[in-house]
Image (tube, rainbow, N blue to C red):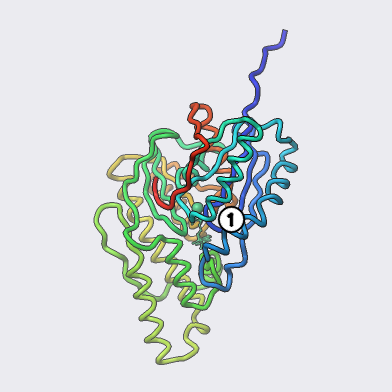
Amino acid sequence: MGKKSSPSVVILAIESSCDDTSIAVLRDGEVLSNIVSSQIAHKDLGGVIPELASRKHLEKIDYVMDAALSESGLSLKDLTAIGVTAGPGLLGSLLVGLSYAKGLSLQLDIPLVEVNHMHAHILAHFIDDPKPSFPFLCLTVSGGHTQIVKISSVSEMEILGETRDDAAGEAFDKIGKMLGLDYPSGPQVDKLAQEGQAIYDFPISNIPAYDYSFSGLKTAVKYFLRDEIKKDKSFIAKHLKDICASVQAIIVKTLMQKLISASEDSGILEVGIAGGVSANSGLRQALKVTAVERSWNAYIPQISYTTDNAAMVAISAYYKYLGSQYADLSLTPFTRGF
Ligand code: KG4
Ligand code: ZN
């Protein structure tokens, strides 16, 4: 007689905190689909325009839902619970995903599970094997956040340090904008940096403990460019790759210095990176090199789990569902919070 297997847990998760509309389906911890529709409407506008972002989510969400279900090979009746990002993020954008999730939860009479976007970036490490063991240190670097987090279990996380002003992704984007690149310019700075040399010296911010500051770098680059352009109007065009390589090098060095201190002081050798900036080639390489030097077990997410995606929301919702941590339909979005 065969062993009776327990029914599958199927989570459909929705992410709409900023400018990516994403829906994923996860069965027993395995990603069956993870559809991401990124808004290109903000490209020439220098940043995400909140009103535009929420309208674009509304336009895209039905299509993303159909694609996610169809790719998973499952239907609505197979779903066990709905996971959704409630924050931090843009209120209007979050509301679109949250309302959609509540509608599904009501219609299907299945639980709604609330997910924190920053927790989700970290828990993306718990989708594929090998998974980190606890305690685990994670440097979460995105467009809105830069945090070093100590993770003691999937539900116990403590911020050890964070940025006091701009996030690392914001530094890439704002400096990229000064260089005439489209938003978000992090990926373009990365690409150009790979063909350049880090020959320009920019100051590293000296902030206590594990905190960061990137606003000084932004100002330093601004005045550096102003002075060089006075001497040569085509300075940026002529030296774009080297400027990008220099900016990337200092951001990566700053990020790694604090992460190394946090690991040294805590004795934690399980170390990972997460969030949009963890797609950066310089940061990925620096983590690999440091891991060898310091005997770390390093965790680098696959590229599709670095920038915003619903698979990371689904895995977070899965763990909360297993712990019976359900949200009720009065759930509201929030801009800040961990
Ligand atoms: O996590 P994410 O998709 O959204 C937020 O939650 O903010 O991160 C987006 C950020 C943007 O600032 C973008 O420029 C940056 O991640 N980014 C990169 C790279 N890919 C994305 N920054 C540097 N190098 C990259 N390859
Ligand atoms: Zn994010």
* Nearer the observer, 265 or 114: 114
Which residue occupies the extreme left position in the image? 208
**Dot 1 alpha-carbon crowd within 10 angstroms: few under 14, some 14 to 19, many 20 or more:** many
Q: Which x, y percent locates residue 200? A: 39, 76
The residue sitting at 58% across, 45% down in the picture is 99
Q: Is residue 155 visible?
A: yes
Query: At x 52% / y 27%, what residue is drawn?
Result: 322
Is 37 placed left or right of 338 in the picture? right
Q: Secondary structure at mark 1?
A: strand
Q: Is residue 42 above or below residue 60?
A: below
Quadrant for residue 70, please give it: top right
At 61% across and 35% down in the image, what residue appears? 105
Question: Callout 1, which amino acid?
Answer: Asp
Whether label 1 lies within 8 Å of ligand 1 gets the answer: yes
Q: Residue furthest top?
A: 1
**Which residue is at the front of the view, 94 or 177?**
94
- Is residue 134 among the parts visible in the rendering? no
Residue 31 spot, x, y in % from top left:
64, 39
Q: Which residue is disc 1 drawn over?
A: 20
Where is residue 248 shown, x and y percent of the image? 44, 66
Q: Is residue 131 above or below residue 175?
A: above
Q: In this picture, is 251 found above or below 273?
A: below
Residue at the spot x=30%, y=52% of the render? 210
Image quarter of the C terminus: top left
